[in-house]
Amino acid sequence: MTGRRIVVALGGNAILAKDASAEAQQRALQETARHLVNFVKEGDQLIITHGNGPQVGNLLLQQAAGSTETNPPMPLDTAVAMTQGSIGYWLQNALTTALAEQGLSSDVATLVTQVVVSDDDPAFTHPTKPIGPFYDLTAMQKINATHPEFEFVEDAGRGFRRVVPSPRPVDVKEAGVVKAMVNAGIIPIACGGGGVPVVSSHNQLIGREAVIDKDFASEKLAELVEADLLIILTAVDHVYVDFNQPTQRALTKVAIDELREYVTDGQFAAGSMLPKVEAAMAFVTHRPTGQAVITSLENLADYVQTGSGTVISSQALVTDYD
């Protein structure tokens, strides 16, 4: 019997922490793959998406540092495609190994995915998406002197990060391919880094200098492939209200209407938990029979066994708090 169709969205920061080496990122993905295999063991159909904020930022810096007149850096949309390939390569190998360790056999394939955005999206004139590493003020000013076209913002007291446009996804060009792969028993890795941002013009798809939020891209893909479940992984086991305050509460089961009230009250930080909550709400709005889950990678095993995590539904009879 066919299990649930599940989209799992991994964060780019979960792949790259302090060590940016390929070896360190591959080790992180090996651990990630061991968690993801639990869904395959349960008979679920798995679709994996991932972020690339740190990776694409580092790649752009490497290209800028080594660029010449005859060897110019690649544009941002192409850099996104490049990180789709590199991270997907690491992840599909890690997942293939993890499946074999559990005596399972499934093909895993990375799909270079184009995500359609609107050319009129206001994000193109108001860059907000952080990419790359954190810098102190001196390092940021030094980079800005060489690359005045880069825009930086202070990010949550942790330093300065470059920001780029982050338009909302309108469509996923390869959604039908993802669906066909799942139906054929293949585990797709898709919408890497939120997908390559493209606009549609005169029967062409044209790349744009932007990075799409991977949570919104994952939601759009989950909606289009008719997923039963969207799991968005973050650094904490639950979504909290009154976060880091004495009255802090962890949400375990919550209806979309109540969650919308928390958003209106400003409970969730922009650029952090807010896009995850908004993506979860969008999914259960478009798929009322589905659910969205926000939790940590480390809590996935508990979620599979007990349902632990923040579970968002279109309606819920009881809202639970911890």
Image: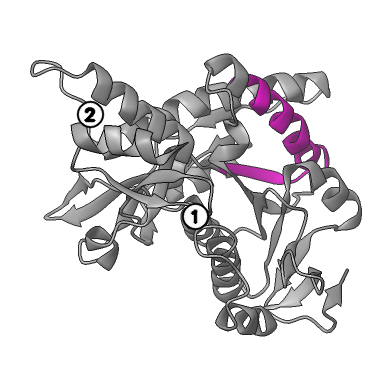
Give amino acid for label 2. Met
Q: Is residue 41 in view from this perspective?
A: yes
Check disc 2 and report its element: helix, strand or loop: loop
Q: Is residue 78 in view from this perspective?
A: no
Quadrant of res 66: top left
Give amino acid for label 1. Leu
| Residue located 53% across and 29% down the image | 109
Relative placement, left or right, of 46 versus 308 is left
Q: What is the x, y in percent for residue 145? A: 21, 35
> Was residue 179 drawn as part of the magenta stretch in this picture?
no
Relative placement, left or right, of 18 versus 214 is right
Q: Quadrant of the C terminus?
A: bottom right
Q: In front: 142, or 272? A: 142
Per the image, the residue denoted by label 2 is 74
Magenta segment's dominant SS is helix
| Residue located 70% across and 30% down the image | 33
Crowd rating for badge 1 (residues with CA inside 10 Å; few <14, some 14–19, many 20+): many
Per the image, the residue denoted by label 1 is 221
Q: What is the x, y in percent for residue 201? A: 14, 55
Q: What is the x, y in percent for residue 262? A: 64, 80
> Was residue 44 drawn as part of the magenta stretch in this picture?
yes
Identify the mark nearer the N-term, 2 or 1.
2
Quadrant of res 25: top right
Which span of residues is magenta-colored? Answer: 26-49
